[in-house]
Image: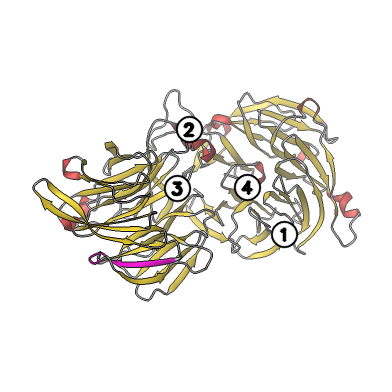
C-alpha cells in the first residue's frame, strides 16, 4: 500500500510500498479512496459500495491527497513523464501539470486549498509547488535525498518533507515574494537533526491547534521526534518497536504506526504516552478465529484519523484495511475491515451454475482467486470486497507480508492456477513448485497433494461431464501433460511429452484433448479405450510461425480460439486440426494478446494484451466492441460471470 488519506470526507490508501505521503482524509461523507492500478476507488465502508476515478493516460497512480474542503483529489503517477492531476471527487479532471520525469512519490494540498506540493522519485530530485487553479508551477527546487512524505503547516506558510536522512522546511511566503510571473527557486531550510542525522524518517506531520508551530516525525527505527519552531529536534521518544512507518497528528493525539500491528498513541503537547490500540487479525487467520498463542501480526503501514467521528483508518502490510472507532480509547470497536491479496494474483475461477442447485457447495455468484501470497480466497461477486473465506497453503505466513518479502529466495512462492470441477465439488490448484492440490469445496479442505511436475504448473483442465469419464489434466513449464483419474483418487493415468517447450494451455472436448505451447505447436490427442484403460494418442499436430500464449474452446466445444504473439486470435477445428479463421486479437499495434476467454453464451471473447489493456470482440464477426483498461500490470487471468453480465480480471498489480 502506498498511501492512505483522510480529509473531512474521505480516507485514502494505495498500493505498493507505503509512505506517509499518501495519507489524507475528509470527514464529511465517510469515503475511503485508494489507488488500484490506473483507478482510484472511492469506497463507502459502512455501505460497502464503490465509485471510481479512471486515469485515461493509463499510468498507475502512485500518490493521492484530498483538498481541505473534501471536494477535490490530487493524484501523482508513476512512469515516464508523469502528471500531477486534480479531480473532482465525482470523477471529472479539472487540472493537471507535468513537472516531474520519473514518478511522483507524494502530493499534498496546502491547508488553505490554494496550492499543491508534489515531490518526485529519488532520481527525479524535484519538489514543486503549483497553483492548481491556474495549472502553473510557481516554485520549484532540487532535493538530493529520497523523500517519502510531506505535510503542510496549519497556516500554509510552509511545508515539511521527510525521507532518508532528510527533514526539510520549505517556506512559501519567502518564495512568493520573489515570484515575477515565473517559476522561482523554492526556499528551504534543513531541520537540525543533531545525533539523528543518519536516521531514515518514514513519516511527518505538522502540528495542529496549540501545537501548530511544532513538527512531528517518525523514524523507521522506531523514534517519535518533535521539532520546535526553530527547526530544532527538541524531544524524542522510543516507541519500543522494531520499526515504525507512519504517523497521524490531530489536536489531541499522535498515532504512530509500528511493526506487528501496533499503534501507539501519544499527547502532542509533551509526547506523553497515552495508550496502545488493538491490533488487527493475526497473519494466517481463519476468518472465524480470534486468537492464537504466539501469533504474528502484520505491520502497520499507513493510518489516518477523523477527529470529528473518532474513526481511525489503518492499512497493514498484508494489504488489509481497518476502520476503528476510537471514541473510547480503552474500548475501541472495529467499524470495517477488508483483507486483500498482498502479492501478484495469478488466476481466478467463477463457481459454475449447477443443474441441481441443492448440490452446490458455494453460494451463487462466488469466485475464487489465487496469489503468490500462498492463499486462495473466496469472494462474492455482488459485493467484491466481501471476502467469504481464505485458504492458506502452507504454514509460512511471511508470504502474506507484501510482495518484496513474499517471493522468497527462489521466487517460486504461491498458487499459480485454479480450476473447478464441472460438478462443483472439487477445486484443483497448481503451485509454482509443481505441486498439485485438490480441495473439497464444501469445506475448502485439502483432500489430495501430488508432486506432479518439476516446474510451475501453468494450466489445469477437468474433462466435461458429458464425456462420462472424470479426468484432470495438468500442464507445466516442464513440457509435460499429466492426466489424472478422479475416480481413482487422482491417480496418474497417463503422461504426454509431445511438447518441446512450456505448455501454455490445455483443453478437453468430448473425446479429445487440445494443447498449445511456447514451441509454437498445437497437439490434438484423441482418447481411445484399450484393455489397459483410456489412452490419449496424437491425431493432429499443427505448427505455427508464432508463439501461442493461451487457448479457449467455443461454446460448441468443436473449435478452439488461440491467442498468438502476432496480435491475432486463430480459430482451429478440433476435429480436423485445420485453421478456420484468423481474428484480430488486439485493438492497437502495441499489445499482443496473452490471454483469451470465451463468454458462456459464445457471443463474445475477451483478450488481455501485453499493453495491459483488455479487448472484447464479437466471436462471429471479429469486431472489437470494447477496449478496457485499469490494471497497471499484465492481466494474468479473466473470467466472464455465469450470467454474462460481468468480466472479472486479476493482475500482477495485486
Quarter of the figure with residue 139 = bottom right
Q: Is residue 89 magenta?
A: no
Asked whether residue 256 appears in the rendered view, the answer is no
Q: Which residue is mark 2?
A: 398
Mark 2 to mark 1 CA distance (whole Å): 39 Å
Can you identify the residue that label 1 sits on?
98
Residue drawn at point x = 85 percent, y = 40 percent: 189
How crowded pointer 2 is (Cα within 10 Å; few <14, some 14-19, many 20+) is rated as some
Asked if the residues shown at circle 2 and circle 1 are in contact, with their CB atoms under 8 angstroms apart, the answer is: no
**Residue 356 found in image quarter:** bottom left
Give the number of the mark in front: 4 or 1: 1
Q: Which residue is mark 4?
A: 5
In the image, taking residue 519 as reference, residue 264 lies left or right, namely right
Residue 260 or 197: which is nearer the viewer? 197
Q: Earlier in the sequence, mark 3 or mark 4?
A: 4
The residue located at (50%, 43%) in the rendering is 335
The tag earlier along the polypeptide, 2 or 1, is 1
- Circles 2 and 3, Cβ within 8 Å, touching? The answer is no
Q: Whole-Å distance between the Cαs marked 4 and 1? A: 23 Å
In the image, the segment drawn in magenta is 568-576
Tell which of 57 and 352 is nearer to you.
57
- Element type at mark 2: helix
Which residue in the structure is indicated by mark 3?
345
Indicate the position of residue 59 as horizontal and vertical percent values: 60, 58
Viewer-nearest residue: 317 or 535: 535
Task: Reply above or below: 393 against 608.
Answer: above
Overall secondary structure of the magenta section: strand
Depth check, mark 2 against mark 4: the one in front is: 2
Amino acid at each position: 500500500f502506498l498511501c492512505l488519506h483522510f480529509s473531512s470526507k474521505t480516507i485514502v490508501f494505495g498500493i505498493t510500498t507505503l509512505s506517509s505521503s499518501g495519507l489524507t482524509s475528509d470527514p464529511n461523507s465517510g469515503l475511503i479512496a485508494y489507488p488500484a492500478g490506473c483507478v482510484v476507488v472511492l469506497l463507502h465502508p459502512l455501505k460497502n459500495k464503490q465509485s471510481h476515478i479512471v486515469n485515461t493516460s493509463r499510468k498507475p497512480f502512485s500518490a493521492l491527497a484530498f483538498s481541505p474542503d473534501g471536494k477535490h483529489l490530487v493524484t501523482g503517477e508513476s512512469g515516464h513523464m508523469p502528471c500531477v492531476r486534480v479531480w473532482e471527487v465525482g470523477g471529472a479532471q479539472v487540472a493537471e501539470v507535468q513537472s516531474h520525469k520519473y514518478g511522483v512519490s507524494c502530493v499534498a494540498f496546502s491547508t488553505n486549498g490554494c496550492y499543491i506540493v508534489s515531490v518526485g522519485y529519488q532520481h527525479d530530485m524535484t519538489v514543486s509547488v503549483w497553483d492548481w487553479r491556474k495549472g502553473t508551477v510557481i516554485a520549484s527546487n532540487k532535493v538530493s535525498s529520497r523523500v517519502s512524505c510531506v505535510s503542510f503547516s496549519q497556516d500554509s506558510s510552509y511545508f515539511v518533507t521527510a525521507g532518508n536522512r532528510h527533514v526539510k522546511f520549505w517556506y512559501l511566503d519567502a518564495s512568493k515574494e520573489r515570484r515575477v510571473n515565473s517559476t522561482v527557486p523554492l526556499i528551504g531550510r534543513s531541520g537540525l537533526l543533531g545525533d539523528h542525522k543518519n536516521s531514515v524518517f518514514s513519516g511527518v506531520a505538522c502540528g495542529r491547534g496549540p501545537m501548530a508551530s511544532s513538527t512531528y516525525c517518525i523514524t523507521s527505527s522506531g523514534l517519535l521526534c518533535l521539532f520546535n519552531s526553530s527547526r530544532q529536534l527538541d524531544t524524542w521518544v522510543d516507541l519500543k518497536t522494531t520499526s515504525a512507518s507512519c504517523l497521524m497528528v490531530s489536536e489531541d493525539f499522535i498515532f504512530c504506526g509500528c511493526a506487528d500491528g501496533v499503534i501507539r498513541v501519544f499527547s502532542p503537547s509533551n509526547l506523553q504516552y497515552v495508550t496502545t490500540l488493538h491490533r488487527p487479525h493475526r497473519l494466517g487467520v481463519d476468518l472465524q478465529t480470534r486468537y492464537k498463542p504466539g501469533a504474528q501480526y502484520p505491520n502497520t503501514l499507513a493510518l489516518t484519523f477523523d477527529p470529528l467521528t473518532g474513526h481511525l483508518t489503518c492499512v497493514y502490510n498484508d494489504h488489509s484495511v481497518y476502520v476503528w472507532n476510537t471514541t473510547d480509547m480503552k474500548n475501541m470497536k472495529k467499524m470495517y475491515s477488508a483483507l486483500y491479496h498482498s502479492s501478484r494474483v495469478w488466476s481466478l475461477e467463477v463457481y459454475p451454475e449447477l443443474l441441481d442447485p441443492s448440490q452446490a457447495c458455494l453460494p451463487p455468484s462466488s469466485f475464487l482467486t489465487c496469489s503468490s501470497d500462498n492463499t486462495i480466497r473466496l469472494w462474492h461477486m455482488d459485493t467484491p470486497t466481501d471476502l467469504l473465506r481464505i485458504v492458506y497453503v502452507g504454514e509460512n505466513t511471511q508470504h502474506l507480508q507484501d510482495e518484496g518479502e513474499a517471493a522468497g529466495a527462489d521466487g517460486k512462492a504461491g498458487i499459480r492456477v485454479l480450476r473447478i470441477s464441472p460438478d462443483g465439488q472439487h477445486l484443483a490448484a497448481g503451485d509454482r513448485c509443481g505441486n498439485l492440490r485438490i480441495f473439497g469445496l464444501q469445506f475448502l479442505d485439502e483432500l489430495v497433494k501430488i508432486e506432479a511436475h518439476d516446474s510451475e504448473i501453468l494450466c489445469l483442465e477437468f474433462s466435461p461431464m458429458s464425456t462420462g469419464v472424470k479426468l484432470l489434466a495438468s500442464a507445466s513449464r516442464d513440457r509435460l501433460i499429466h492426466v489424472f483419474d478422479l475416480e481413482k483418487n487422482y491417480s496418474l493415468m497417463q503422461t504426454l511429452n509431445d511438447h518441446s517447450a512450456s505448455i501454455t494451455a490445455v483443453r478437453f472436448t468430448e473425446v479429445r484433448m487440445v494443447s498449445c505451447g511456447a514451441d509454437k505447436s498445437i497437439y490434438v490427442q484423441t482418447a481411445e479405450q484399450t484393455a489397459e484403460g483410456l489412452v490419449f494418442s496424437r491425431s493432429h499436430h499443427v505448427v505455427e510461425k508464432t508463439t501461442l500464449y493461451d487457448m479457449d474452446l467455443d461454446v460448441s466445444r468443436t473449435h478452439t480460439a488461440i491467442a498468438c504473439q502476432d496480435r491475432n486470435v486463430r480459430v482451429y477445428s478440433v476435429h480436423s486440426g485445420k485453421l478456420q479463421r484468423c481474428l484480430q486479437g488486439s485493438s492497437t499495434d502495441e499489445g499482443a494478446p496473452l490471454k483469451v476467454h470465451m463468454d458462456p453464451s459464445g457471443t463474445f471473447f475477451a483478450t488481455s494484451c501485453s499493453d495491459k489493456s483488455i479487448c472484447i470482440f464479437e466471436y462471429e464477426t471479429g469486431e472489437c466492441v470494447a477496449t478496457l483498461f485499469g490494471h497497471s500490470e499484465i492481466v494474468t487471468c479473466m473470467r466472464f460471470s455465469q450470467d454474462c453480465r460481468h468480466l472479472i480480471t486479476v493482475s500482477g498489480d495485486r
